[in-house]
Image (cartoon, helix red, strand yellow):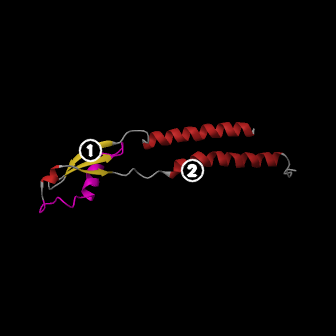
């Protein structure tokens, strides 16, 4: 019975890992966006594959260039400043499910085995 638990636990963890990797887009390449600010300054934003254009524009607006503004301009403003968006934080629920379900099954199965064997101590 323990061997079946090991096999099913390994399968469960592998399936949950595959779902997590596919859902979080961890294996996809990052996308590059070119954004222009209000003072005609340019940004090249490297973003995660699941980022929307609105998120990229909001990220560029939160990180303005100090060397280009309405009062300060120069030829350097025509060259894009490179910014990299961080990935969204990892959702821990999937990790808890991946390891919690097999651990819970082991505890419950062990309890049933102990109860059906008459609550005897292992010697």
Which residue occupies 73% across, 37% down? 3
Q: Secondary structure at mark 2?
A: helix
- Quarter of the N terminus within the rendering: top right
| Relative depth, front residue between 87 and 16 | 87
Tell me, for residue 96, which label it has, or none: 2
In the image as oriented, which residue stretches furthest toward the bottom?
71
Q: Nearer the viewer, mark 1 or mark 2?
A: 1
Residue pointed to by mark 1 = 33
| Relative depth, front residue between 117 and 35 | 35
Look at the picture and state if 85 lies above or below 14: below
Which residue occupies 14% across, 56% down? 39
Query: Cβ–Cβ below 8 Å for labels 1 and 2?
Result: no
Look at the picture and state if 59 lies above or below 34: below
- Residue 120 rendering spot, x and y as whole percentages: 86, 51
- Residue 44 rendering spot, x and y as whole percentages: 25, 47
Task: Answer with the quarter of the image where residue 48 lies.
Answer: top left
The residue segment tinted magenta is 47-72
Kindly report the distance in space between the C-alpha atoms of the residues bearing marks 1 and 2: 35 Å
Which residue occupies 13% across, 61% down? 72
């Amino acid at each position: 019975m323990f061997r079946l638990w090991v096999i099913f636990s390994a399968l469960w963890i592998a399936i949950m890992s595959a779902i997590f990797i596919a859902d979080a887009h961890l294996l996809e390449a990052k996308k590059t966006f070119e954004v222009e600010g209000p003072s005609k300054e340019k940004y090249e934003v490297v973003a995660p594959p699941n980022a929307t254009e609105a998120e990229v524009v909001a990220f560029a607006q939160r990180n303005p260039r100090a060397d280009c503004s309405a009062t300060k301009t120069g030829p350097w403003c025509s060259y894009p400043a490179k910014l990299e968006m961080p990935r969204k934080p990892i959702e821990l629920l999937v990790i808890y499910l991946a390891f919690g379900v097999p651990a819970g099954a082991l505890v419950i199965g062990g309890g049933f085995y102990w109860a059906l064997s008459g609550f005897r101590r292992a010697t």
